[in-house]
Image: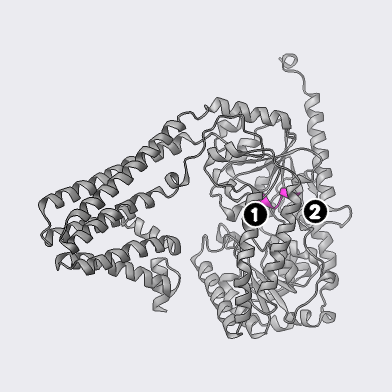
Amino acid sequence: MTIRRLCGALRVRGVTELFLVLLLGAAFAALPVFALLPDWRGFAVASAVTYVVDEVLHSRAPGFVRRLATLQLTRPLRFAVRTVMLLALASRMDAPEAVLVTALAVFSAHFAMMMLYTAVHHAVRRRRVLPLVVRNLDMSGLPIPEQPPALLYRRFLRKLLHLDLPAHAGLVAALAAGSWQPAYTGFAVALAVTAAGVVALLDQYRRSRRMPATEEVFAEVNRQLGGYRPEVALYFSFASVSRDFMYQVNMWIETLEQLDLRPVIILRERASFRHLSRTWIPVVCVPKADDLAELELSGVRVVLYPGNAGKNVHMLRVAEAKHVFIGHGDSDKLASSNRVSKVYDEIWVAGRAGRDRYQRVRHAISDSAIVEVGRPQLSPIRLHAEHTPGPLPVVLYAPTWEGWSDDDCHTSLIPMGVRMIEKLLAENVRVIYKPHPLTGKRSAEAAEADKAIRQLLHADNERRGAAEAEAAAAAAKPRLKEIQARLDELAGHLGGDDAEQVRESRVPDREGAAEWQELRAEWHRIYWEAQGPVRHNVILKQLPTLYECFNQADILISDVSSVVADFVASLKPYVLTNAHDLPDQEFRAAYTTAGGAYLLDSECARLTEILDSVRAPRTDPMVLDRRTLKEYVLGPDHPTSTERFNAAVNALAAKAAAERAEEPAPELAA
């Protein structure tokens, strides 16, 4: 337990990383000792350890490195300390004054050139910042200089600092040999290479001065949008965009691609692009509100909002369009019946349950403003009748996160998650654990429970002797990595800064969708085959997808969230956690999705009984309830959700066009 607490305090994971941290500290502590003895051999070993371990920790324990930075023990300072100790060693070993003066001058010049390089690098980056970023529009007509080579541009500080190595090695070699020529050679090499880097970057700065002006950028983007003539926009903003939030956009992409009208995606945070899924739809990211107003979007009739965010007001002010809240999942949480929704012209829900939810909260939202469109994203989910059970029942535990406040906290992780997993492991089942992407963002207790569950599953895998499955998973990694690289390429994750993204933007080949689907299917097939039929799985990345986890599972255990509403589409048995042990009737009355669920108490006393529904499906008493609930929550199977969503977009766009046609001309109105 002491080691675990120490790992947590130092932001490291496991004994190996803790050993590396302690080794780094010991090596730095040894430098002044060997410098004062003096002992060049010990100093050389300690210095080499600090170089190597420092570099390893940057990749293996970035949390610890960030912690050092908050304590002002930055990497440049660590390099400076090593240099000062080297000069102390040279002085204690009676190095000639000329060598010491030259060493001091060389190291000072190296740090000075590093500061100059940093300043020039920042200047280049500032010049290459464009007012917007685009994808899937042909921007080849815009004269944007190529991004500087990665050698000069990416992780430059780490590279620059290590250019002191020739000088350090040369001086240590000179102290060992008693001949000062190696020192002067090392000094010359260090200065020459650093100076060459500065000169090369200055040339890149000269090229960056040819960046197009803001007016040119908007003129070209608007020219491209004018040719494309978008009619429907998906608009998304979030205060802290990361992969964790972009699922709210990515889940709608395939639906947008099947619309009759021409869609466009409008993002507000630059980080969004790094996590956007594959699409041929034009995407425009405009961080500033004033710049958003400069876009040519006069043909847009319908704007779709998957989330409620403060920056939505920047788009809502466009009076010519109809604004629709579509959300990013249908659930019994407060977010699925938020009073903020009154600002939209319409609210689209999956089924009758969504309509009733808004009517119950009495936010003065007109019944005519609520439209039932189904959930088009659910088509990949296989029905219970199509599922083939494995040798062990597969339980998918997919808890929600702790929410933005305690009022909206529905996660079972904190009150009962660890206890539930312990009891599941005693039931001889296979567990697929997929926590919400935001788990632990607000609550340290949730993060601790999440960590404990992962450790339990890992330990049980070892107990089961899953060595064969581990070997199969390891053997599959190269092919999975290869597929993932191609998927990233198809998604447009080309790397480079914003300017490079715009420079490389082209109108994509829509046929890439077929390859994308085939590769994702192959990735999932290889992944699940490699996992084997008995090994527990912890799913933390985008792949495998949530719906693929649905398809693997025999039963779901989850909380009040949209995960449950989506799982209802499969008609498989599912469990809702009743962490506060409300009476069953009260719980079912409060949460619509509980209508077809088994309810699990906080002590998990009902777990064995519930699992019997999987082990003996004929004794499953909730079958009819799930079928009834499916239509109530998600709407009818015919027409399909995709058809209903498309029809809703067409109808609202036609309404917007009709209202615009009825408006008097500006001169007549005057």
Number of marks in the image?
A: 2
The mark that comes first in sequence, 2 or 1, is: 2
Residue plotted at (53% across, 34% down): 130
Q: Is residue 352 visible?
A: yes
Disc 2 versus disc 1: distance between alpha carbons? 32 Å
Q: Main secondary structure of the magenta part?
A: helix
Residue plotted at (63% across, 49% down): 276
Q: Name the image quarter holding the C terminus.
A: top right
Does the stretch in magenta take in 472? Answer: no
The residue that disc 2 covers is 374
The residue that disc 1 covers is 486
Q: Characterize the local packing of mark 1: few (<14), some (14-19) or many (20 or more) Cα atoms within 10 angstroms.
A: some
Give the answer, above or below, for where 638 lies relative to 529. Answer: above
* Quadrant housing residue 614: bottom right
* Residue 362 pos. (x, y %): 72, 50
Q: Characterize the local packing of mark 2: few (<14), some (14-19) or many (20 or more) Cα atoms within 10 angstroms.
A: many
- Residue type at mark 2: give it: Gly
> Is 235 on the left or on the right of 170, as rendered?
right
Q: Quick one: 366 or 83, which is closer to the camera?
A: 83
* Quadrant housing residue 583: bottom right
Q: Secondary structure at mark 1?
A: helix
Q: Name the image quarter holding the N terminus.
A: bottom left
Start-end of magenta stretch: 248-254
> Is 285 on the left or on the right of 513, as rendered?
left
Residue reaching furthest to the right: 638
Q: Quick one: 327 or 99, which is closer to the camera?
A: 99
Q: In this rendering, which labeled residue sits more in front, label 2 or label 1?
A: 1
